[in-house]
Image: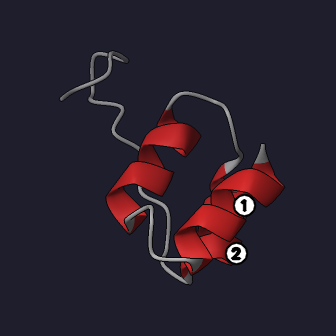
């Protein structure tokens, strides 16, 4: 999945936010998100442990 997401991001078909969604859903790791986008990954976990949207 990492290679596909990276290729599509590099082609401009995915935004950093879309790549982050893959990381949030566990399809790629936070480290892979950072490697693909060059941006720091920030989890969307809130203080109750749930996901926010």
Label 1 Cα crowd, 10 Å radius (few <14 / some 14-19 / many 20+):
some
Identify the image quadrant of the N terminus: top right
What residue is pinned by disc 2?
35
Separation of disc 1 and disc 2 at Cα?
5 Å
Residue 21, percent across and down? 43, 41
Q: Residues within 10 Å of mark 2 (few under 14, many from 20)?
A: some
Q: Relative to 19, is 31 on the left or the right?
A: right
- In terms of depth relative to the viewer, which is nearer, 47 or 16? 16
Q: Quadrant of the C terminus?
A: top left
Residue in the picture at 49% in, 54% down = 19
Name the colouring of the figure.
Answer: secondary structure
Front residue of this view, candidates 27 and 6: 6
Identify the residue at image location x=72%, y=61%.
32
Dots 1 and 2: beta carbons under 8 Å? yes
Query: x%, y% of residue 14?
Result: 44, 61
Residue 36 drawn above or below residue 23: below
- Picture residue at 28% right of the left edge, 16% below the top: 48
Residue 44, numbered circle: none
- Quarter occupied by residue 37: bottom right
> Label 1's element?
helix
Is 20 on the left-hand or right-hand side of 10?
left
Q: Residue at x 55, y 69 (%)?
A: 9
Residue 34 picture quarter: bottom right
Q: Residue furthest bottom?
A: 38
Q: Which residue is mark 1?
A: 32
Q: Secondary structure at mark 2?
A: helix
């Amino acid at each position: 999945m990492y290679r596909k997401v990276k290729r599509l991001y590099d082609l401009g078909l995915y935004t950093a936010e879309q790549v982050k969604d893959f990381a949030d859903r566990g399809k790629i790791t936070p480290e892979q998100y950072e490697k693909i986008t060059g941006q720091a990954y920030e989890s969307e976990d809130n203080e109750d442990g749930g996901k926010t949207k």
